Image (cartoon, helix red, strand yellow):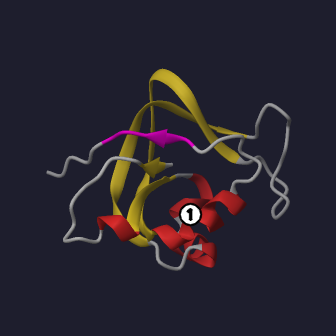
Amino acid sequence: MANSGGEDRGGQEEESFLYFAYGSNLLMERIHLRNPSAEFYCVARLQDFKLDFGNSQGKTSETWHGGIATIFESPGDEVWGVVWKMNKSNLSSLDESFARVQKRMVCHWSIKRS
């Protein structure tokens, strides 16, 4: 899930984006397979969404033959994950990784640090 909002980080905003990850993309080794520019940004919570495995067509991972992690809107629930900061050149590899997903979900959000 990409952040379409902007944060000024010293002029690097045009070259990078923030990506909320869950499931296997929580692992640095996994995210770096196709997205070598990914840098850990923070732990995050996505409010009013729920984590599930599989999808309405019953598809499973071609790699490990289990249910594919997915999220869906669910008022009152939350999904915990991490935010990766990536170079925009990695957008195409993310799209290829999630070709089975019908649309890219873009949410407007902000990060609160304590």
User: Can you say whether 24 is above or below 108 in the image?
Assistant: below
Q: Residue 41 falls in which quadrant of the image?
A: bottom left
Q: Secondary structure at mark 1?
A: helix
Q: Residue 108 falls in which quadrant of the image?
A: top left
Query: Which residue is situated farthest in the top direction here?
Result: 75
User: What residue do we see at 85% from left, 56% from top?
Assistant: 65
Q: How far across and how far down the image is residue 37, in percent?
A: 47, 77
Q: How far across and how far down the image is residue 26, in percent?
A: 52, 61
Of residue 13 and residue 54, the one placed in the foreground of this image is 13
User: Can you say whether 114 is above or below 48 in the image?
Assistant: below
Q: Which residues are magenta?
A: 105-109
Q: How far across and how far down the image is residue 53, in percent?
A: 70, 41
Residue to which mark 1 is pinned:
91
Query: Which residue is situated farthest in the left direction here?
Result: 114
- The amino acid type of the residue labelled 1 equals Leu
User: What residue do we see at 27% from left, 44% from top?
Assistant: 110
User: Can you say whether 89 is above or below 77 in the image?
Assistant: below
- Graded by Cα atoms within 10 Å as few (under 14), some (14 to 19) or many (20 or more), the crowding at tag 1 reads some
Is residue 107 within the magenta segment? yes
